[in-house]
Image (cartoon, grey):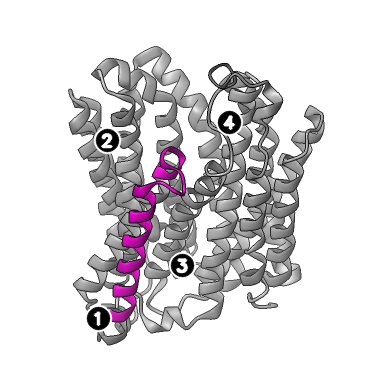
Amino acid sequence: MTRTAARPRAALLASVAGAMIVALDGTVLLVAQPDLRGDLGATVTEVQWTSTAYLLAVAALLVIAGRLGDRYGHRRLLCVGVLGFGAASAGIALAQGIGLVIALRAVQGVFGALLQPATLALLRLVHPADRLGRAVAVRTSAIGVAAAAGPVLGGALVTHWGWRAVFLINIPAALVIAALTLTVRTPEVPRAAHRRFDLTSGALLAAALAALVHTLAGIPDEGWTGPRTGLGLLLSLLLAAALVAYERRSAQPVVPPAVTRSVPVTASMALLLTTSGGLFGALFVVTFHLQQGLGLDPLTTGLRCLPLTLLMITGAPVASAALGRFGPRRTAITGQLCVVLAVLGLSRPEPVWQTGLVLAVLGAGFTAVMVTATGTVVGDAPPGYAGVVGGLKQTAMNVGPALGIAVAAGLMPLTPPAAAGLPVTDLAPGLALPAVAALAALGLIPASLLPRR
């Protein structure tokens, strides 16, 4: 194998492994949280903050991390990010109190933010345009595998070794990914990427995103009309307005004008936001209804959703082929229509086999949009700004699910049948799924703005 041929392969492996460790970490923790709560004597709110602290750090810093990668090199940022991620995992595994766990989860989120944009930027730097779609499809399938395997792996680890084991497995994985990253060779970054960016802009962006994600994450408990929700949304809006006003005057904005003026990039961001919101909003409603409404256990619920997972994994290569044949616009519109129709289909009571078929359509549509929008984001990134574009993409993928769940939670009852004194049929999804479908339908607008070819 020649050195030139080895570059794309090593970069693809590093990108896939980096994306998988993040996806796996999130899903295995969900299984470990009950055991963690019992071992550390934590409250439910404190356990929830082990996820919230991580999410806030990631969402707030992704764009800034991408900008740092553009300036200092994505290979370096990926290596630092994954090693820090592993070190934070080791600290969590040794922690003796819930406070330290929450703090280290925030630290883990910082390093998670460093590594995620780099995994996409590396693909752009080493893969030619005609092979970029395949690399993105492989990465998408790998993320699906990790997300699907997380609950199973987490259950096995917690059962035999306790909750600390789900963090200990990150340590050897991080070392392997770091070693793999060091073998990657990338072209020189354009000089434009070496410009400084305004720290005030970065701070305003981080604060606005953190306030928004924190507010959306609290809506299932507070509701859309709660005072905390109103204050949080107002704060987010004020910070966003301040950011826009400051960015217009800044000589080195955190999101460069070359990125904001790119229609394919901005349209892809909006598409990813609405599509991920539609998927996770629908999953929130369906899993809640199956468990709290119909009384199914988590394993049975997971099996009911298996067609969705399978199509997310196997559909990526098909989506990549469709992208090459039909172009981004038609592929994205078709995928988005599948998402909208599937979410609407889930709102109708159907036999189990029909529900599985609808979930399969949802998974196929989501994967088609993911592959198309990600490929467009990475492929159309202005020279020297692959990192900041990758950070924006990951930000959309973090905010979108929080938005979708907030929309769904605000329109459905969250009280179990026994406590509410209602029959199971009264806890049906109701208006939640049509509202989530409407959110997903908004994605048809940016999908129509993507390039034909």
Q: Which residue is drawn at 76% across and 44% down?
A: 345
Disc 3 or disc 4, which is closer to the eye?
Answer: 4
Residue 42 forms part of the magenta stretch: no
* Residue type at the position of mark 3: Val
Q: Up-down: is 170 above or below 79? A: above
Taking the spot 31% from the left edge, 80% from the top edge, the residue there is 245
Badge 3 marks a residue whose secondary structure is helix
Mark 1 or mark 3: name the one nearer the start of the chain.
Answer: 3
Closest to the observer, 352 or 69: 352
Question: Mark 1 falls on what kind of element?
Answer: loop
First along the sequence among labels 3 and 2: 2
- Identify the mark at residue 288; answer none if there is no mark: 4
Q: Mark 3 points at which residue?
A: 126
Instruction: Look at mark 1 in the image and give the residue it sits on.
Output: 195
The residue segment tinted magenta is: 218-245
Q: In this view of the protein, which residue sits in the foreground, 219 or 108?
A: 219
**Vertical order, 4 against 290 (above or below):** below
Which of labels 2 and 4 is toward the front?
A: 4
The mark that comes first in sequence, 1 or 2, is 2
Specify the label residue 89 is tagged with: 2
Q: Cα distance, mark 2 to mark 4?
A: 30 Å
Which image quarter is the C terminus in?
Answer: bottom right
